[in-house]
Each structure stands twice: as structure tokens, then as C-alpha cells.
Image (tube, coloured by chain):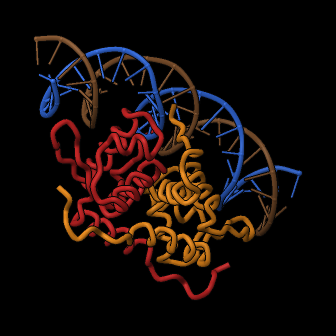
Chain colours: A orange, B red, C brown, D blue
Amino acid sequence: MGLAKTEIFTEQQNEIALIAKVFGHPARVAILQHLFKINSCVCGDLVNVIGLAQPTISQHLKELKLLGLIKGNVEGTSVCYCIDTEAWTDMKGIMIKFLDQDLPDTECC
Amino acid sequence: MGLAKTEIFTEQQNEIALIAKVFGHPARVAILQHLFKINSCVCGDLVNVIGLAQPTISQHLKELKLLGLIKGNVEGTSVCYCIDTEAWTDMKGIMIKFLDQDLPDTECC
DNA sequence: GTAATTCATCGTAATATTGCAATGAAGCAA
DNA sequence: TTGCTTCATTGCAATATTACGATGAATTAC
């Protein structure tokens, strides 16, 4: 099928999965790390830094934008992308809550 | 292509993406949450809890096992799956380091 | 031995993802 | 205007993912 049965899971589970899916490609991880590093960016920049074709970068940016993690502002001929700090903080809270569950003191088997 | 160009990214970026990819499906999120909750589990249990067919659950468990996050021990006819606490802690460190990058004080645009 | 249970694996269909060439849209410079 | 730059979108091919029925392997119960 290739289609997840989202309707049988909780909203929280689907949300975690949606976030994680976006991080599930090294190009998007690299884009975010670069945005953190220079805190101001245009797509052309990224094409040089990452090493994928311009349409491919544009597509990855779109997915990050769809999740709300980055914002894009048109500035003349170029577009300035940057981290949406508020959205990032919200997302971080959701993910860390999932990652930081209490570990069992003893292995069960 | 459907194939990520992993060779152009750093080992760290690929590792984060691999971890995130595993969390990128609500069934695997649900499996992990259930394992955290009851701290001892068999696959049949999960089939009832999650609501997917047994081969599908088995497949998701395989991916979690491949990443090393869970361990499976055969116990008679059933298999006991549980979180690998050490691997989970290691993974958590990698992901939190990525999520917890310093946010820029000012939005750039 | 047979039968029942539990889980893994195989095979397959439907859908999603990745990557890029080609093209389009919008702004700037002359 | 024309040309240039920058980025988005379209269209397509190759590959990956998801889900499940059918089947297989291993164990237990009798």
C-alpha cells in the first residue's frame, strides 16, 4: 500500500511520526543545520552547500515549510529562509517528551 | 529515484535521518510507547493493541530491532520484546543534540 | 505422532519518496 | 523592451514503504 493507516493511531502518535518523517532525510537535516549555523539563507546558497540540484532542494524546503519549521520571505529575486523559532520550540517539546520517557530500571528479558 | 544520496552528507546527518525515519511511522511510535508502558511484550499483544495485521507488526518490529532500539528474546512459543535502554539513551543523546541547537535570538526576516 | 499457538518470512499490490531536466514566474539591470 | 538571476512547479523514472494473505519454522500440549 505505501499508505500509513493514520486513523487507527492517536493524534499525538501521528504528530510525532509526521515530524520525524521530515527529519528522516539527511538533506533536510543538513538544511536545518545550515540554517541554524548562518541564521539567514537563500536557496541558491543551499544548492552549493548541500550538493543536490536546485529543484530537489526546493522540494525539501517545501516540506520543512509545510511542517512550519522554517519561514520563507521573498527579498527581490531571492528568497530568505530561516528557522521559525517558535514552531521549533513547540516541535522540540513534543519530540523530547517522546524521547524522554522513563526507562525501565530492569531489562525484562 | 526514491533513493537518498547518503554519500554527500555527513555521518551524523545520515544517522539522525536513519533514526528519525524509524520514528516516521505512527505504528512504530505506538509500539515504542506501549513497550515503555508495560515494559514487557509479545508480538501478539501488539497486534491487539495496535490494530494492524500480524505480519505488519512483525515488520515494524524488525525495523526497530535493526536500529537496535528494542531487543527480542524467544520465550517458548512467544517472543518477548523490550526497549534496549542503553541504545535508547544513546539515540536520545543524538536526537536531543540535534533538536536542542541554539536558536537565533532574532528572526532574520 | 497430531494439533494448536506464536511469530517470521515471502510475495505482491498500492502508494510514497527521491532526484532531476525542463519550464515557468517574478524581480532587477541595462 | 531584452536579458539575467533566483526560485517554484511540472513531469517523469527509479526506488522505497506500507499492508496483508499465504506460508513456514519453532515450540507446547495432548
Residue placed most toward the observer, A60 or A16: A16
Q: Which residue is situated farthest in the bottom direction here?
A: B105
Vertical comparison of A103 with A86: above or below: above
Vertical comparison of D9 with A83: above or below: above
Would residue B9 be visible to someone looking at this image?
no
Quarter of the picture holding the C terminus of chain A: bottom left
Horizontal side of D24 relative to A33 (left or right) equals left
In percent of width and height, residue A26 lies at 42, 56
Would residue B57 be visible to someone looking at this image?
yes
Residue placed most toward the observer, B93 or A14: A14
Vertical comparison of B81 with C7: above or below: below
Residue placed most toward the observer, A37 or A100: A100
Identify the residue at image location x=48%, y=41%: B51
Q: Quadrant of residue A67?
A: bottom right
In percent of width and height, residue B68 lies at 24, 54
Q: Quadrant of residue B59?
A: top left
Identify the residue at image location x=22%, y=40%: B78
Identify the residue at image location x=23%, y=71%: A105
Residue placed most toward the observer, A23 or A39: A23
